[in-house]
Amino acid sequence: MARKKEYIEEEVIEKAMVLFWRNGYEATSVRMLEKAMGINQFSIYSSFGSKQGLFLKSIHCYEGYLQGMIEKLRNSTNGVEGIKTFFYDSINTPSDCSTPKGCLVTNTLNEFANSEDKLIKEQVILFTTAIKELFIEKLREGGEEDEELLIKQSNYLLIAKQGLSVAAKVASEKELSDYIEMTFRDF
């Protein structure tokens, strides 16, 4: 007879997500995961198959964590201003500081830039492509019709958003606000 799980899977995945977000994939050991998640190595491997499997679940959890911001952008009706609000929302960290600054997806892009791990790269590319498509949709709502320009602008905004995520770890609120204002100055 199989043992019953003595933990709530969503809760332990969220704890793993925060640890990966804070430390990165490679710097996060299984021992660290055991401690943060409150479960043993056997349970980690039994439930998620591997550290990579747990990391992929953590990225999916992160997407859920951002869902409110993404829905707010998707439902905005003011084109570029909606994207600008998305940028501001992404740097507004909760007052309890329970989550790290920056972005797990951007951190993962940086960490896996030269990696052979296709599963993790694929997951991150799917996420960033969805954001870029949303940017295109909002730019189009703002009146832009030139498809080539829409793609260039969305690429620019995606890279600017990634830069903002990195800067959010060390820059002041004023510096981050100035960066956002300058990014949208010519839109």
Image (spheres, helix red, strand yellow):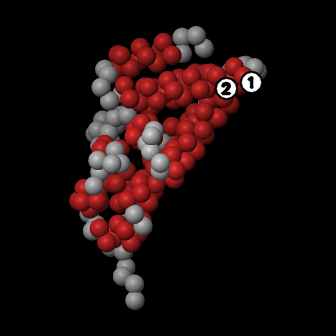
Looking at the rendered image, the quarter that the C terminus falls into is: top right
Q: Quadrant of residue 33?
A: bottom left
The mark found on residue 24 in the picture is none
Residue extending farthest to the top is 186
Label 2's element? helix
**Side (left or right) of 140 relative to 111:** right
Q: Are marks 2 and 1 in contact (CB under 8 Å)?
A: yes
Q: Amino acid at mark 1?
A: Glu
Looking at the rendered image, the quarter that the N terminus falls into is: bottom left
The correct choice, above or below, for 164 with respect to 24 in the image is: above
Label 2: how many Cα within 10 Å (few below 14, some 14–19, many 20+): some
Q: Quadrant of residue 139?
A: top right
The residue carrying mark 2 is 151
The correct choice, above or below, for 10 with respect to 140 in the image is: below
The correct choice, above or below, for 113 with respect to 81 in the image is: below
Report x, y in % for residue 102.
37, 34
Q: Residue at x 33, y 48 (%)?
A: 26
Q: Residue at x 51, y 37 (%)?
A: 69
